[in-house]
Image: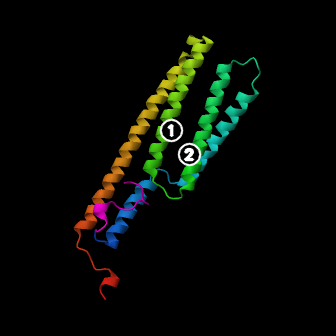
Amino acid sequence: MTDRNDAPPAGFRDEPRDPELQARYRARLDARLQSTWPAGRRLRYGLIAGSGMVGFLVAGSLSLTEPSATPPAVRGLLGLFALFGLGWSAFGVWAMARKSGDFARERRIASQLAMGFTLAALIGLGLAETILGKGSASAPMLVVALGFVVLAAVGSVHARIEEAELSILEHVLRLELRSTPSRPAPDETR
């Protein structure tokens, strides 16, 4: 449970509420989430959405306006890259629309998008190379695409590790909350 807006699990609903420990938990979690990029989440996802839209417009306009002599495989790849840009733009808008951050979850989703888009690009490049019959000329692109697949896989593993670390931190602090003697709430003393 790493989303800060989720309700606590059933076993934690009756835990004592110590405002000091709750404040410590929120401070640690916020510091952990904000330390990754101090510029802020709106700017980060605004840049992702903007660059995705630029990619969509450039690749989409190229796929539509290329001369008729351009092979259909090349047009198909440009259309595929336009869809990638549209996907990144949609991800950035979705993340900004959520208004509250669960950075680990958003990072995991972004890494899964990167992995899927990179695999699709690798397959598309391979098919275009086969259709066009330019094996030796497209080999460097396929090697670079394969490198990006490895990079996306490493990013995905790192995002999952970070999500697990935040979940562990949350559970440790919840146990800390449960183990401290509870102080009566102000309205319970009456």
Q: Which residue is disc 1 drawn over?
A: 113
Q: Which residue is disc 2 drawn over?
A: 91
Q: Main secondary structure of the magenta part?
A: loop
Give the magenta-colored segment's residue range: 1-14
Position of residue 124 relative to residue 89, above or below, is above
x and y percent of residue 148 in the render?
Answer: 49, 29
Q: Residue at x 32, y 80 (%)?
A: 185
Asked if residue 84 shows in the view, the reply is: yes
| Labels 1 and 2 touching (C-beta < 8 A) | yes
Q: Quadrant of the C terminus?
A: bottom left
Query: Hey, what amino acid is under mark 1?
Result: Leu
Q: Secondary structure at mark 2?
A: helix
Is 12 colored magenta in this rendering?
Answer: yes
Q: Residue at x 69, y 37 (%)?
A: 57
Taking the view exactly as shown, the residue that stands out farthest to the bottom is: 190
Position of residue 33 relative to residue 159, above or below, is below
x and y percent of residue 120 in the render?
Answer: 53, 28
On screen, residue 67 versus residue 22, left or right, reads right
Query: Hey, what amino acid is under mark 2?
Result: Phe
Is 84 colored magenta in this rendering?
Answer: no
Front residue (pair 138, 186): 186
x and y percent of residue 174 in the render?
Answer: 29, 62
Q: Residue at x 50, y 54 (%)?
A: 38
Q: Secondary structure at mark 1?
A: helix
